[in-house]
Image (tube, coloured by chain):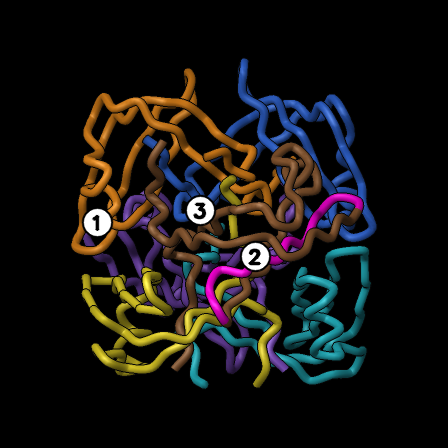
Chain colours: A orange, B blue, C brown, D yellow, E cyan, F purple
C-alpha cells in the first residue's frame, strides 16, 4: 500500500515509554534529528515496537508548521 | 519563545508553490529527506518564504504515525 | 509496512476534484458512509487517484472527535 | 449546531479505557469497521461515555490519509 | 449533539476567501483575537458561511501547541 | 523565530495535570475562554509549565472546525 502522506522519515527506535493509554516513542531519523511520536499504547504493542526497530515516521503535510 | 512541539527539523526551502488559498512548500531537511508542508498562502506571503530560506519544520508528536 | 494508525476504512473513490495545490477526494466506505479526504494535488497525481479506485482511508485515533 | 467537518460516522461505543489524562474509546461504526478515538479523560467523563452509547465519530477531511 | 472537543470559541466571521478546493475563514473571537480556519470550499458553501455570521471555532486539545 | 501558524492566543496557565505520558494544560486566554492543550509530559516538564505562567496557545488553521 502506497500512502498519500509524502513525509516518510526512516529511522531507528531509541526509546519506548508506555503509559496507561498512550506511548511515547523516540525515533532517530538522521543525525542529529530525533522524532518523538505519540501513539496509543495498544498500537505500540500491536506493532511490537522495541528499541532498535527500523521504522518510518509518517507525517501528513498539512500537519507541518514552518518557523522562520 | 520555546515551543512544546519537540519535532523541529532545520532545513532549506527548495520550492514554493502558491495556490489560491494554500501553498505547498518543500524543505530539504537532511540528505535524503525532504519535508512537504502545506500552509496558507497568506502565511507563506507573511513570512516571505522563498527558495533558499533557512526554515524549521515543526511537527507536534501526536501527528506522527509509525510504520513498521 | 504496517501502520500504527488503527482506523483504516476500505472504500472506493467516487469523485476527485483537483485544485491548484489541494485535492478533494470522495471515498464511499460502506453504505451510507462517504469519507472526504483533502490531500495535496501532487499526492493525488502521484498515486494516480481516479474514480473507481479501491483505496483505504487512514485516520490517526487522536484526530477523532466524539459527538454524543 | 452544524459542523464544517463532513466526516461523521454514527456508531455505538464498545469499549472505554480511561488512563490518567487520556481515554481510548472504541466505536463500532458499521460492520466490520471499528473506529478508535483518543480523547481527554475529562471529555470522556463530561460526556459520560459508556459502552452501548450511540455516538458520532467526527473527522476533519484534512486529517485523512489515503492508501492505495 | 455535544462534542468531546473542549475548545469552542464563539465569534463572528469577518472574511471568507474561497479557493478552488479550500476556503480561508477569519473569525473574530474576542478582542484582539482572530482565528483563521481553513476548511473545504464545499463545507463553507454547505454552511453558507458569510461575513457577519455567528459561528464557533472548534479545536481538539491534542492540536494545541504551547509556546513559552 | 516567526511561525506560519497564525492562531496564537496569549493566556495564563490555570492548571497542569500530569499523566504518565501526556499532560493536560488549562490556559485562560480571555474572559470567558479557556483553552485545553494536551501535550507530552516531557514537554510540559522541559518548558517547566506551572500555574500562573504566561504562555501562547498555537493552533494551525487547518486544525480548526467551524460550527454554525
User: Picture coordinates of residue E36 (x, y %)?
Assistant: 68, 63
Q: Are marks 1 and 3 in contact (CB under 8 Å)?
A: no
Determine the secondary structure under disc 1.
Answer: helix
Question: Who is closer to the viewer here, A51 or E52?
Answer: A51
Magenta run includes residue C30: yes
Magenta stretch?
C20-31
Picture layout, residue C34 above or below residue F62: below
Q: Mark on residue B63?
A: 3
Neighbor class of circle 2 (other Cα within 10 Å; few <14, some 14-19, many 20+) is many
**What is the spatial separation of the Cα atoms under label 1 and label 3, in whole angstroms?**
17 Å
Residue F4 in sight here: yes
Cα–Cα gap, marks 2 and 3: 22 Å
Query: Label 2: which residue?
Result: C27
Magenta stretch contains residue B22: no
Residue C57: give x, y in percent of width and height.
Answer: 48, 51
Q: Residue at x 37, y 22 (%)?
A: A11
Residue E68 seen in render: no
Instruction: Measure the alpha-carbon separation of dots 1 and 2.
Output: 27 Å
- In the picture, the disc for residue A42 is 1
Q: Residue at x 37, y 58 (%)?
A: F38
Where residue B29 sits in the image (x, y, percent)?
A: 56, 22
**On the image, which quarter does residue D9 sit in?**
bottom left
Amino acid at each position: 500500500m502506497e500512502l498519500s502522506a509524502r513525509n516518510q522519515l526512516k529511522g531507528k527506535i531509541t526509546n519506548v515509554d508506555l503509559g496507561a493509554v498512550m506511548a511515547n516513542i523516540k525515533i532517530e531519523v538522521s543525525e542529529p534529528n530525533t522524532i518523538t511520536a505519540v501513539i496509543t499504547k495498544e498500537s505500540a504493542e500491536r506493532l511490537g515496537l522495541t528499541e532498535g526497530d527500523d521504522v518510518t515516521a509518517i507525517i501528513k503535510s498539512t500537519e507541518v508548521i514552518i518557523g522562520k
